[in-house]
Amino acid sequence: MSVCQAQPLLNRKIMIGISGGIAAYKIPELVRRLKDWGADVRCVMTQGGQAFITPLTLQAVSGNPVHHDLLDPNAEAAMGHIELAKWADLVLIAPASANTLAQLAHGHASDLLTTICLATAAPLLVAPAMNQQMWAHAAVQANCDTLRSRGVQIIAPDSGSQACGDVGAGRMPEPLTLRDVIAAALTPVTPVLAGKQVVITAGPTREAIDPVRYLSNHSSGKMGFALAAAAQQLGATVTLVAGPCQLPTPAQVKRIDVISATDMLAAVEQHIDAADIFIGCAAVADYRPRQVGADKIKKQHDQMHIELVKNPDILATVAARKNAPFTIGFAAETQQLEHYATGKLQAKKLALIAANNVSDSSIGFNSDDNAMQLFWHDPAGQIQQRTLEKASKSAIAIAILQHAAGLMAATSSQP
Ligand code: C5P
């Protein structure tokens, strides 16, 4: 395995500023996940941040001293605020409290973190986290607008139940989402999908047998979620139709959760009219039970039979539409990759198919890496192919979408 491929942030210097907020409890996890990807992480804490987690915790997980004093001669002698500001390739403030946002917006240098933010030339990302009422306050929003106008990237908070008991927007995104946002910020890409609408299916589907049992598969949803994050990074507006999977929603992606193949098709059909690109990445169950038991089926006989009926093929349904979007499919195979993938390219009338060998456990399903073979028709109708060597699913997702954008541009420029 190539270290570079599995560690997209190898040797990148990430500074995390932690201000006061209960979401600070997620930061040790973020630090560990950044280190998994090869990053060197240093943490700077405000006084408020230290009320929620300890410097010792962050020192242990980052393997670096934690910084919190601006006017301490000993701390300055070790690594002063200017040195820290120059050290960072990227500064992320997470959680960013309403107070820290206000301090930054007004250019205060009242503690080590705000001073570093003034002194650094590195990109600054902030992940606000606070009570929904505070987040909605005009003063907080105005401070965010000011920061945006200066090139600061504000990572929109998630909505949901909050530690204080309220429900609404203000939750800090999960560590894996923040890691993706950091990786994207450090890997600038040409926005080849700017102005495009992309609909993606991801994850498994669950087909109910009775109220407590279902048929499903091992899809983790990681590839589909990586495609959603990548499409957003490349400038598209993204709708992600996700089967049941435990993955954080990529930043600025609209997520629709569904359970069964029938639900998934309905959600796709609701959003497909405006789509320029459709990516069927879900591992849709091929069959579902003909009848769903109204009550739990009791254990009675030595054998039981469940009659299955075929599920709709979502990808083929979209590709068969009049004015179909550019349609991309996936083929997870254990043998004869090219034969089956090109068969599906033709049978489902796809513009592009990405195939991988799922019998290799280091790629596919639950892995963070993948390797792909792309197949498509050239203008003369001949099948062409390209290999995407093993890399993180995020890198593979970017490569697939860049390839698709190239094919779309070539088609639209044809006389
Ligand atoms: O035919 P097969 O299931 O191998 O095709 C895989 C491709 O078709 C994937 O892109 C998958 O998302 C899509 N698919 C679908 N609806 C189905 C079955 C597969 O969209 N019912």
Image (cartoon, rainbow, N blue to C red):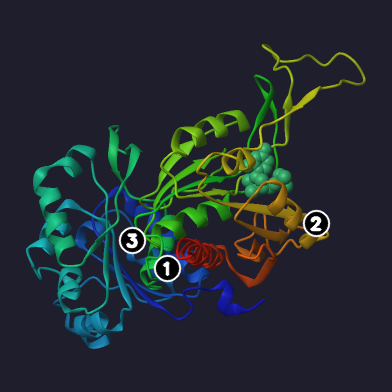
**Nearest-to-viewer mark from 2 and 3:** 2
What is the number of the mark on residue 183? Answer: 1
Furthest residue in direction bottom, as rendered: 77
Callouts 1 and 2 close, C-beta under 8 Å: no
Callouts 2 and 3 close, C-beta under 8 Å: no
- Give the mark nearest the N terminus, 2 or 3: 3
Query: Is 14 or 254 nearer to us in this picture?
Result: 254
| Amino acid type shown at disc 2 | Thr
Whether disc 2's CB lies below 8 Å from ligand 1 is answered: no
- Residue 176 lies, in percent from the top left, at 46, 57
Query: Is 239 or 370 nearer to us in this picture?
Result: 239
The residue beneath circle 3 is 54
- Residue 4 lies, in percent from the top left, at 56, 79
Q: Give me the residue at 50% from left, 40% from top.
A: 241
- The quadrant in which the N terminus is found is bottom right
Mark 2 burial class by Cα count in 10 Å: few <14, some 14-19, many 20+:
few
